[in-house]
Image: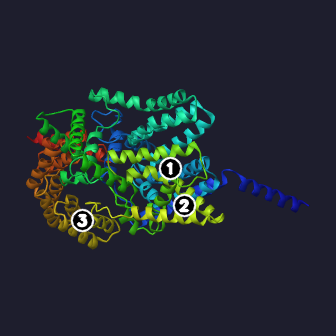
Amino acid sequence: MKLNKTNHNTSTLTQKVLNSPLFLPILIFILALTVRLLYFSEMKRNGLFFEPMADAKVYHEWACQILATRDIIGKDAFFMNPGYPYLLALLYAFFGVKLHIIVIIQFIIGSISVILIYFIAKNIFDDQVAIISGIIASLYGVFIFYEGLLLTASWINFFNLLAILFILKATEKESKSLYLFSGILIGISSLFRPNILLFLPLLLIWLFFYSKKYIKLFFFILLGTLLILLPVIIRNYVVLKEPVISSVSSGINFYIGNGEGSDGSDEIIHKIGPLYSTPKYMWSFFKSEAENSLHKPNISYYEMDNYWKVKTFNYVKNNPLIYLKLIIKKILLFLNFQEIPNNYPYHIFKINSSILKHCFDSKYITPLALLSLIGFFNYYKTIKLNLLRTYFFIYLFTAIIIFVLSEYRLAIVPILIIFTSYSIICISKYIARRKYLKFLMSVLLTFSLYLIGNINMNLQNTIGSYHWRGIIALKTGNIEKAVFNFKKSVEIEPSALSDYFELGRIYFNNGNYQEAAIWYLKSLNINNSFEAFYSLGTIYYKLNNLNLASKYYLEAIQLDSTNGNVWNGLAIIEANKGNFREALNFWETALKYTFNPEQINQIENNMKMANSINQKVNKLD
């Protein structure tokens, strides 16, 4: 009897677990996190987990600076959206500057986002659509790829999806607190990328059709958003004396996506010179161009931003047909299967990853999603659907007015996944109910949309394949292959400055200082860069040519006098020459611009030794 009772209790417990509304979401979460951790393991094993580059490097260094100086206000304009570097600084404060921990956190956030997709699909449709959506999102390769990088995409998806879910729940209950929290989430997301703010006016229209109290309910969403944005706006006004919402890049981005020579992506910035991928240099270039055109030195960042807006508006106004073609191209790019990179190329990493190779990407979801988006199916007629459609078209609109990149487009992928799942259910119902004509029409339409998404858009630049093959070969330890690819990249594109630097670093790390110097000197024929001068200073110090080393360090200071490493290098040279007083002066300056605790300790120890020797020399004198 006891055995039967035990079996009965076990069976009842199992039944309770299986019937729990959390059982399936937890299973889907486990699937999503397992796949991401397998990819993380592969990244570390293959050497693909490397130092941040381009935007990721800026975010990382910005976060480290906030952490080191404890200055959360700052003294300059935000050249990039501040949300992510401030979040990174907070995470670094808790966990230390450990990139692998940040990536694991982002994989967890990505897995939670998968569950949010599940619950949104369930709220609007049903369990079937929710389960399919959860499985596709768990195995969507581009999600996994961006979650593994120090970039904003995974967090934007998380905040946006959470905001949408809370709006849906708040609308059912007409809950002011849930609307307020939705607004807070929209505000936070806008600090990572402000596109979501354009969602607000259309959200008001959507609420108008959903509730008689739409004004009052929208007020709480707006209040939540302003609670987040107002401190940033006030900060910008205090620091810049100008009313800037977040960053000062909107005019420049508008020009990149719509100015003369734009191809719908960010190709136009490649024309500004070999340091286009360095945000600090890029903004300096755009400011200098505006000052030269306006014949006005030292313009404010607000004036700079406004200059590029006006310049672009004038070009659009004077070239309406060219702009119309550009808009059509952007729409096609937005729906295209190609992942257009601005930092890291997904297609190159996918080739080198056994995990990403077997994951879903846009070609599996976009055609089916578009069928539902355009209203081909009518099994579900609910106003909630229009909330997702509104969100989708807002991001399409922002792509039209700015430009199309894979990372920026990722915000609408959760919506595409939900609509894809809905399409799958609808098509399966056609088969089950023997509606073969409708089934055939849906297949033909899907195939037509597939052909549109597969059009070769002939983009001029999708980030040099040889460069990234070189990077991956380098990180996986194949130095010979890396050198071949970097040299091939330079051969094809002689102004590919970063590849000269990579070759210089490879030869330097292998102790071949003369060959390293050759590649850095070649880079100076393209651009007088801080990295080249600083690296040449270090190389000639290694070669014991102190005068030449000092010369190149001083050249580097002319380009960036706020780098602690170069002042430290000059101090070491002067100490080697016996000029301890001069060395101490250089070390004092180095300390002002050094934020790494270990480097600070090393400099302080060097100063103590130099000061001690200097005092002994003075006594002898």
Residue sitting at the far front: 437
Query: Disc 2 or 3, which lies upstream in sequence?
Result: 2
Q: Circle 3 is placed at which residue position?
A: 506
Q: Are marks 2 and 3 in contact (CB under 8 Å)?
A: no
Q: Circle 2 is placed at which residue position?
A: 34
User: With respect to residue 620, does 425 lie above or below?
Assistant: below
Q: CA distance from mark 2 to mark 3?
A: 35 Å
Residue shown at 33%/53% (left/top)? 328
Give the x, y percent position of residue 438.
Answer: 57, 62
Nearest to the observer: residue 599 or residue 402: 402
Tell me which colouring the rendered structure shows: rainbow
| SS type, badge 1 | helix
Q: Quadrant of the C terminus?
A: top left
Q: Does residue 484 appear anywhere in the picture?
A: yes
Query: Badge 3 local density, few (<14 within 10 Å), some, or many (20+)?
Result: many
Lateral position of residue 334 relative to residue 248, left or right? right
Mark sitting on residue 389: none
Q: CA distance from mark 2 to mark 1?
A: 13 Å
Lateral position of residue 16 relative to residue 616, left or right? right
> Tag 1: residue type?
Ile
> Tag 3: residue type?
Ile
Q: Does residue 278 appear anywhere in the picture?
A: no
Residue shown at 52%/29% (left/top)? 220
Q: CA distance from mark 3 to mark 1?
A: 36 Å
Lateral position of residue 138 relative to residue 325, left or right? right
> Tag 2: residue type?
Thr
Residue shown at 45%/29% (left/top)? 227
Mark sitting on residue 109: 1
Nearest to the observer: residue 517 or residue 214: 214
Q: Quadrant of the N terminus?
A: bottom right
The image quarter containing residue 196 is top left
